[in-house]
Image (spheres, rainbow, N blue to C red):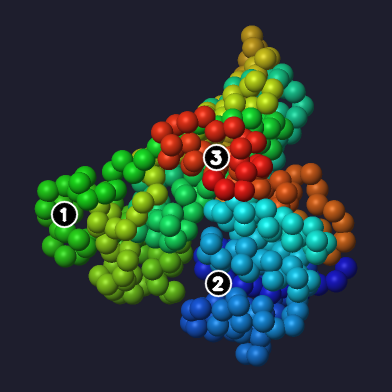
């Protein structure tokens, strides 16, 4: 089978540090032959790492897309509101696509991309990486086997993690929905996709509540400075202090040996000196109470499915762990699925519980609990073999339904929790 040529548009955390790495894991399946990013240092580094000739290194995705077709497939890992603007020209050039989520925060753009992919006859897989994990693959198998009967109620929570909320959604790229996506779409379209796929159900209506509770000026503690290193009087007791997160934190701090994410978002090659300089002068050193953020830090979503079953979902930035927990309640039993512990407990009514240790089911739990590498490999295999996507794969047409739910939830939240009928979202051209 042939080795696929890959063009990579966007060299951020997902493009450079996650999907590009697949070329080293599966060199017989892919070779990076063209790259694009506005950061010249990243372009130079990736070009050297993957031996990309200078003439195939571009300063933007637009410059790359202006060329004749250079590869078999394109990985699009640019910013949220750029995805469709890059994807449609790529489809018209003849590329099949691996597209970072979310597709777009704009419903019309989502529909336009679906139409373009169909007209061009190209395949698009959206990066809902959690579907591909050993954890959720096993959970789907159990649910499909009917071990707990018909699923009637689902309760899910995404624990964003206090430092992740501060890093990505207060100080970082996804802090403001005017320039990126609403939190419930950007962070939780994973969850909406999983809940639909795992239950095999269709949403009928949605309601939602949420707000920016903490991260705003009126909630700043007394003596808080505009920047963490500017003599902040509240520093000692503030868990969101940038020095704590990026320098001293056991899990995330560069002083503790962490030179990957999130520190490599502040500086290309994290060292104590480069991270400290970034905190001193860059956006990640701002006080979390004095940023230009507007996305929520907590939100609840209630979904009524077409068969009368219900799903309740909570997203919260006020958690220690950065993980997911879901409880499925069925007519014959219940399931507790704890991604942090990597365990699935199946409790049939009146029986002894069965606890499945998912850590024993795979030897690769790197990158989103083992989903990143598997997703890219499945995409590559599908294109190389010239076959249609498996039912488990996150095609564009399947992914867009998760976006409909997330955007319905955001509409409901902004309108005080009004019940939004899904047909209003699926059929309406304006929200």
- Which residue sits at x=73%, y=49%? 397
Q: Nearer the viewer, residue 185 or 254?
A: 185
Disc with the residue nearer the chain's start (1 vs 3): 1
Q: Which mark is residue 11?
A: 2
Q: Quadrant of residue 119?
A: bottom right
Chain-order first, disc 3 or disc 2: 2
- Mark 1, residue position: 224
Q: Residue furthest bottom?
A: 55
- What element does badge 2 sit on? loop
Disc 3 element: helix
Q: Residues within 10 Å of mark 1 (few under 14, many from 20)?
A: many
13 lies above or below 222? below
Q: Nearer the viewer, mark 1 or mark 3?
A: 3
Q: Which mark is residue 408?
A: 3
Question: Residue 418 location, x and y as percent?
Answer: 47, 31
Q: Position of residue 168 (x, y in %)?
A: 41, 56
Quadrant in the picture for residue 353: top right
Q: Residue at x 49, y 54 (%)?
A: 181
The mark tally for this picture is 3
Q: Cα distance, mark 2 to mark 1?
A: 35 Å
* Left or right for 285, reference 330: left
Quadrant the C terminus occupies? top right
Front label number (3 vs 2): 3
Q: Are marks 2 and 1 in contact (CB under 8 Å)?
A: no
Residue 391 coordinates in the image, percent (x, y):
79, 44
């Amino acid at each position: 089978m042939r080795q696929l040529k890959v063009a990579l548009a966007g060299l951020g955390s997902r493009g450079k540090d996650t999907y590009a790495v697949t070329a080293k894991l599966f060199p017989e399946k892919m070779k990076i032959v063209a790259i694009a990013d506005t950061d010249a240092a990243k372009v130079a580094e990736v070009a050297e790492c993957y031996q990309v000739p200078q003439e195939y290194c571009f300063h933007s995705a637009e410059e790359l897309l202006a060329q004749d077709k250079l590869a078999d497939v394109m990985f699009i890992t640019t910013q949220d509101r750029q995805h469709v603007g890059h994807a449609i020209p790529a489809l018209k050039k003849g590329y099949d696509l691996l597209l970072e989520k979310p597709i777009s925060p704009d419903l019309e753009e989502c529909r336009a991309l679906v139409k373009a992919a169909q007209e061009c006859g190209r395949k698009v897989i959206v990066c809902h990486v959690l579907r591909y994990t050993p954890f959720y693959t096993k959970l789907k198998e159990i649910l499909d086997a009917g071990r707990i009967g018909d699923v009637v109620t689902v309760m899910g929570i995404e624990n964003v993690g206090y430092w992740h909320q501060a890093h990505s959604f207060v100080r970082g790229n996804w802090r403001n929905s005017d320039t990126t996506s609403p939190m419930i779409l950007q962070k939780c379209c994973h969850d909406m996709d999983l809940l639909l796929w795992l239950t095999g159900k269709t949403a009928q209506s949605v309601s939602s509540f949420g707000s920016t509770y903490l991260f705003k000026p009126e909630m700043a503690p007394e003596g808080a400075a505009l920047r963490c290193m500017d003599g902040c009087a509240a520093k000692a007791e503030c868990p969101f202090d940038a020095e704590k997160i990026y320098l001293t934190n056991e899990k995330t701090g560069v002083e503790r040996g962490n030179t990957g994410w999130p520190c490599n978002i502040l500086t290309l090659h994290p060292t104590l000196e480069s991270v400290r300089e970034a905190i001193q002068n860059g956006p990640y050193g701002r006080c979390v109470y004095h940023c230009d953020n507007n996305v929520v830090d907590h939100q609840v979503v209630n979904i009524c499915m077409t068969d009368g079953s219900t799903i309740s979902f909570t997203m919260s930035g006020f958690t220690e762990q950065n993980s997911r927990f879901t409880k499925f309640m069925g007519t014959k039993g219940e399931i507790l699925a704890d991604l942090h512990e990597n365990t699935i407990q199946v409790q049939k009514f009146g029986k002894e519980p069965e606890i499945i240790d998912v850590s024993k089911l795979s030897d690769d739990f790197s990158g989103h609990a083992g989903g990143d590498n598997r997703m890219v490999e499945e995409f590559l295999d599908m294109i190389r073999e010239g076959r249609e996507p498996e039912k488990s794969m996150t095609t564009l047409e399947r992914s867009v339904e998760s976006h409909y739910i997330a955007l319905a939830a955001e509409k409901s939240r902004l309108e005080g929790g009004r019940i939004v009928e899904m047909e209003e979202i699926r059929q309406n051209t304006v929200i």
